[in-house]
Image (tube, grey):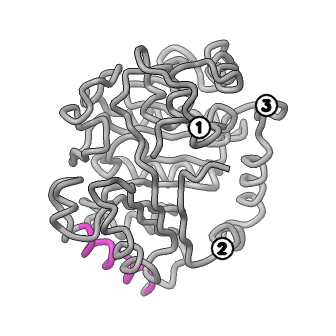
Amino acid sequence: MYDNISRYTEADIEYVLGNVLGKKYLSYREKWQLASLNNIPSFPIHIDFELNDTCNQSCVMCPRNTTQHPDINYEINKGTTLAYSDYQEMINEGADKGLLSVNLGAFAEPLIHDDVFDMIAYAHEQGIVDSRLITNGLLLGKHFDAIFDSGLVNLFVSIDAFTEKKYREIRGHGFKKVTRQLLEFLEEKERRQSLLPIVRVSFVDMDINDEEKSEFLKFWRGKVDIIDIQVFDDFNIDVTKKFNQNKPKKWDCTSPWVRLSVLSDGSILPCCNFFGRNIPVGNIKEITLEEAWNSIALRHVREGILNDNLPNCSICQRTGG
């Protein structure tokens, strides 16, 4: 219904993962699809973790670039780090209650965190079936063995450009390094004859890089499993002042029915979008994830999305593109 993501795949990824990971993965995907107003899981199916409130790049489209985003309503780049022990407690809580998937690359660069691959391995040891790591790839070359040993299911690398010049304008330094390391990783994956991790590259489609989109697609097609052409989200909006409800939505948000996000300071968010930082529903230092999932605060968010009267969420669904 909403044309917010254009995705190219070399294969039926769900079919591949179903064959590799088995019935538990297929059941997880079915539960994700069935989650709705009338079928809210008793615990989030998926959790996005921000491991550290910092990054080694400053991309023009990211709120971490506060020069480009002076109007954000939340603190960012505080330098906090999620403790491995806190992460373990959350995984332990969710493992027996329906948690099936984790993303350790939410909102920041996860490869900065010393324990990232131990965290992935721990989740799988506790029965989590799906794992995702979203990275800018600058530190990828240091971790080939750790990636395969951890059991990582999905490796997502954000690139957003085809040339070094354009990459520098958008993300900063590192274009040749990221490209070389990712190609080397793909060679290593082939050498090991490993179907996992599934490898995706992404390209946020903006005026500044639109001319490179076709070359980006042409270069990575046949090399990676997924190419994501993603719509630009305008995060530089003061949600307390600007709200145009007449603008058509780009998507219908279902996040609070399937997932939670946890920031490195312990804040619990109802979604995986930076806008979610405006509407936290708790903190792991004060309540459990299950309590947050069943809280009045999260119920208010769900009702606001359904009624389209919660400005933060209404704007978020309209800001892309």
- Which residue, given by chain and number where applicable, does mark 2 sit on? 12
The amino acid pointed to by label 1 is: Lys
Q: CA distance from mark 2 to mark 1?
A: 28 Å
Q: CA distance from mark 3 to mark 2?
A: 29 Å
User: Is residue 284 in sight in this rendering?
Assistant: no
Give whichever of 51, 150 is nearer the camera.
Answer: 51
Q: Which residues are magenta?
A: 178-190
User: SS class of the residue under badge 1?
Assistant: loop
If you read the primary sequence from the N terminus, does the residue marked by circle 3 or circle 2 appear first? Answer: 2
- On screen, 28 above or below 47? below
- On screen, 116 above or below 245? below
The amino acid pointed to by label 2 is: Asp
Q: Residue furthest right?
A: 38
Which quadrant of the structure image shows residue 82? top left
User: SS class of the residue under badge 2?
Assistant: loop
> From the viewer's perspective, is the residue at label 2 or at label 1 nearer?
1
Q: Where is residue 207 drawn, in percent x and y?
A: 31, 54
Q: Is residue 321 left or right of residue 170?
A: right
What kind of secondary structure does the magenta stretch mostly adopt?
helix
Residue at the location (38% across, 64% down)? Answer: 146
- Which residue, given by chain and number where applicable, does mark 1 sit on? 249
Q: Where is residue 168 drawn, in percent x and y?
A: 16, 58
Magenta span has 24?
Answer: no
If you read the primary sequence from the N terminus, does the residue marked by circle 2 or circle 1 appear first? Answer: 2
Residue at the location (76% across, 31% down)? Answer: 42
User: SS class of the residue under badge 3?
Assistant: loop
- Which residue, given by chain and number where applicable, does mark 3 sit on? 37
Q: Is residue 197 left or right of residue 75?
A: right
Graded by Cα atoms within 10 Å as few (under 14), some (14 to 19) or many (20 or more), the crowding at tag 3 reads: few
Dots 1, 3 in contact, CB < 8 A: no
Q: Is residue 37 left or right of residue 218?
A: right
